[in-house]
Amino acid sequence: MKRPAFNLVELVICLSVMAIFAAIGPTIANGLLNNWHLQAASRGLVSDLRQLQAQAICRHETLTFNPAQFKLPAGIIFSKTSPIAFAASGQTPPGGSGTLILSNRLGQSRKVIVSSAGRIRRE
């Protein structure tokens, strides 16, 4: 019984498909990696803001967020900052609410919004 074999046309098609994937694979992976870093940074920022809010409540004092102390992954920057503060009640004092925007090298961005009621959310 004869075994079916690959012919030259099938091998060329297979190799060309593999070459296309090899060419576009790193570009797609780089974009995904930058997006994941941006999402991780925004989640970390929300976590740090919630922790600051809890500390303000526990200490019964107004605490202010300092963006310079927040460690960002490589390639992520603050493209917009606002003075964020939390009062002893957990809400923001007048002028303490605002939006922080994180951006990556590809121009993607994520917003972290702190409302005047003290609610922290990501967009």
Image: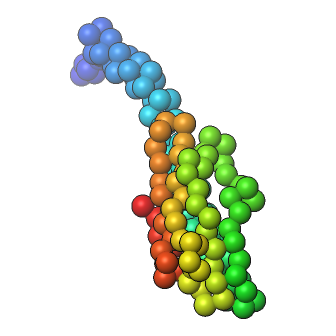
55 vs 82, left or right, is: right
User: Observer-nearest residue: 64 or 44?
Assistant: 64
Q: Quadrant of residue 16?
A: top left
Q: At x 30% / y 8%, what residue is drawn?
A: 8
22 vs 51, left or right, is: left
Q: Residue furthest top?
A: 8
**Number of numbered discs:** 0
When the figure is inspected, residue 21 is found, relative to residue 91, above or below; the finding is: above
10 vs 112, left or right, is: left
Q: Position of residue 77 (x, y in %)?
A: 61, 46
Q: Quadrant of residue 67?
A: bottom right
When the figure is inspected, residue 116 is found, relative to residue 43, above or below; the finding is: below
Q: At x 60% / y 50%, what residue is drawn?
A: 78
User: Observer-nearest residue: 102 or 44?
Assistant: 102
User: Observer-nearest residue: 19 or 49?
Assistant: 49
Image quarter where the C terminus lies is bottom left
User: Observer-nearest residue: 16 or 34?
Assistant: 34
Can the viewer see residue 111?
Answer: yes
Q: Position of residue 50 (x, y in %)?
A: 61, 76
Can the viewer see residue 47?
Answer: no
